[in-house]
C-alpha cells in the first residue's frame, strides 16, 4: 500500500483545478511556493506514479514536454498547432474503435488515446 504524501496530494489537487494541462515544470514552479524544498525530480516521480495508478493522464502530443491532465477518465484533446495549447473536447469516447483496431492486429487492444490538431480559437482570433 502506498503512503499518502502531502506533495503528491498537492500535485493532484493542482491538476484537478487546472484545465490547461500543465507541464511538470509548470507544476514544479507553482508548488515551490508552498513547498520551497520540493525538487523537479519529486514532481516527475509523483506524476509518473499517479499516471501508473490511473489517477492522472500524461499527454504526449509531439511537444517538447509532456503535459498532465487531472481528469483520468478517457477523453479527447485538441492541440493547437500554433501555440501548443491543449484543450479537452467534451465528446463521447468512441470505444468501438478499439474493436475495429483489434481486427487489424494480433496484439491486444485495451484502449486508445486520440489527439485532434488544428488552430485554437485564441490563435484564430475568435
Image (cartoon, rainbow, N blue to C red):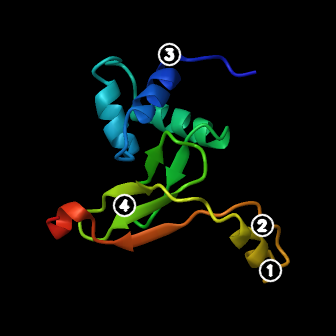
For mark 2, give the secondary structure: loop
Tell me whether the residue at label 1 lies in contact with that at label 2, contact meaning CB atoms closer than 8 angstroms.
yes
Residue that mark 2 sits on? 109
Mark 3 and mark 2: span between their CA atoms? 35 Å
- Looking at the image, which is closer to me, 83 or 97? 97
Answer with left or right where residue 41 lies relative to residue 123: right
- Is tag 4's residue or tag 1's residue first in the polypeptide sequence? 4
Question: How many neighbours does mark 3 have within 10 angstroms: few (below 14), some (14-19), or many (20 or more)?
Answer: few
Q: In this view, does 105 lie above or below 110?
A: below
Residue 16 image point, x, y percent: 45, 33
Residue that mark 3 sits on? 6
For mark 3, give the secondary structure: helix
Q: In this view, does 113 lie above or below 26?
A: below
Residue that mark 4 sits on? 64
Q: Is residue 44 above or below residue 66?
A: above
Residue that mark 1 sits on? 105
Q: Nearer the viewer, mark 3 or mark 1?
A: 1
- Looking at the image, which is closer to me, 54 or 49? 54
Mark 1 and mark 2: span between their CA atoms? 8 Å
Amino acid at each position: 500500500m502506498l503512503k499518502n504524501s502531502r506533495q503528491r496530494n498537492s500535485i493532484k489537487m493542482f491538476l484537478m483545478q487546472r484545465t490547461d494541462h500543465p507541464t511538470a515544470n509548470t507544476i514544479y514552479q507553482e508548488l515551490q511556493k508552498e513547498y520551497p524544498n520540493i525538487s523537479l525530480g519529486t514532481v516527475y516521480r509523483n506524476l509518473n506514479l499517479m499516471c501508473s495508478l490511473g489517477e492522472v493522464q500524461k499527454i504526449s502530443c509531439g511537444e517538447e514536454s509532456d503535459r498532465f491532465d487531472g481528469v483520468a477518465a478517457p477523453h479527447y484533446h485538441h492541440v493547437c498547432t500554433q501555440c501548443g495549447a491543449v484543450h479537452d473536447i467534451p465528446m463521447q469516447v468512441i470505444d468501438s474503435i478499439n474493436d475495429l483496431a483489434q481486427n487489424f492486429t494480433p496484439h491486444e487492444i485495451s484502449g486508445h488515446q486520440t489527439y485532434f490538431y488544428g488552430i485554437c480559437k485564441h490563435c484564430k482570433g475568435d
